[in-house]
Amino acid sequence: MIKLMPGLAAAGLVLSLMSASAFAAPAGSDNTQRPAQIVRVAQMPKYVKPQFKRKKVHLMTTEAAGTVIIDTNNKYLYLVEGNNRATRYGIGVGRDGFGWSGIVKIGRKAEWPAWTPPAEMRRREAAKGHIIPAYQEGGEDNPLGARAMYLYQGGRDTIFRIHGTNQPWTIGLNMSSGCIRMMNEDVTHLYDRAPVGTKVIVIGPGNKQGKVAFEDRGIDVLRTMFGG
């Protein structure tokens, strides 16, 4: 559930999907010429703004420990740990028109998940000249990254996921088709701590999540320095 964007991100993904033969020398040219090197998405720049790095924070909330709160407005995901503590992760969220809100649960999980983009997404991207595959095996160049947590509501798949990304420069931006992107190291960290059945509150357009009491009071210095 990730959109192939024009520019750098699009170029990276397209190059990762193309075969080396696409870069072979044209007929009639010097056949000793070697194919151009393919730039893998996983080798693209991985810069992420400091405010979106994973941190231990003071979080005042009435939500139970183990709950995930996703603040799409500020691009943060919180794993509530109780006693006014939480781990905060930077995220990428849906672009204009693809944001959403609600209360869901993690219905299933997958490591290095395969990607089957919806037919509507493939048609939408094809109209823009971006050809994306009907199916892609999991791996370092897969848009879903290292882990995926599939969000369900009322026992049904919402088609939205919390997943990793091979485009870490998009963390902190509105660029997805509604899914929640995390850096691969962060989504792996959350994956190990959020079991199937975890309550996920997504705060975003429409306010369908209802009233949620939480306040981020900044870095938990003692836990950051000494752990715990």
Image: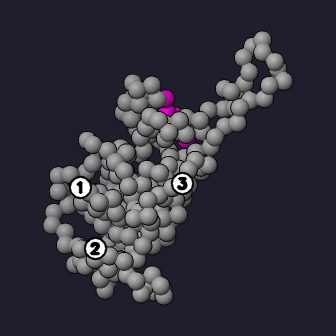
Residue identified by numbered label 1:
204
Q: Is 181 covered by the magenta stretch?
A: no
From the viewer's perspective, tell me whether residue 21 is left or right of residue 7: right
Where the N terminus falls, by quadrant? top left
Q: Nearer the viewer, residue 206 or 118?
A: 206
Q: What element carries label 1?
A: loop
Q: Where is residue 188 in the image (x, y as percent from the top left)?
A: 51, 65
**Residue 113 at least partly seen:** no
Within 10 Å of the Cα at label 3, are there few (<14), some (14-19), or many (20+) other Cα atoms?
some
Give the residues drawn in magenta, as a range.
131-136
Within 10 Å of the Cα at label 1, are there few (<14), some (14-19), or many (20+) other Cα atoms?
some
Identified by mark 3, the residue type is Lys
Main secondary-structure element of the magenta-colored stretch: loop
Within 10 Å of the Cα at label 2, are there few (<14), some (14-19), or many (20+) other Cα atoms?
some
Where the C terminus falls, by quadrant? bottom left
Q: Which residue sits at x=18%, y=56%?
A: 208
From the viewer's perspective, tell me whether residue 156 is left or right of residue 102: right
**Eyeballing the image, is 30 above or below 166?**
above
Identified by mark 1, the residue type is Gly
Say which quarter of the image contains residue 3.
Answer: top left
Say which quarter of the image contains residue 85.
Answer: bottom left
Q: Residue 46 carries which label?
A: 3
Q: Which residue sits at x=62%, y=43%?
A: 40
* Earlier residue among tags 2 and 3: 3
Q: Which color scheme is applied?
A: one colour
Residue identified by numbered label 2:
216
In three-dimensional space, the C-alpha distance between marks 1 and 3, rounded to whole angstroms, equals 27 Å
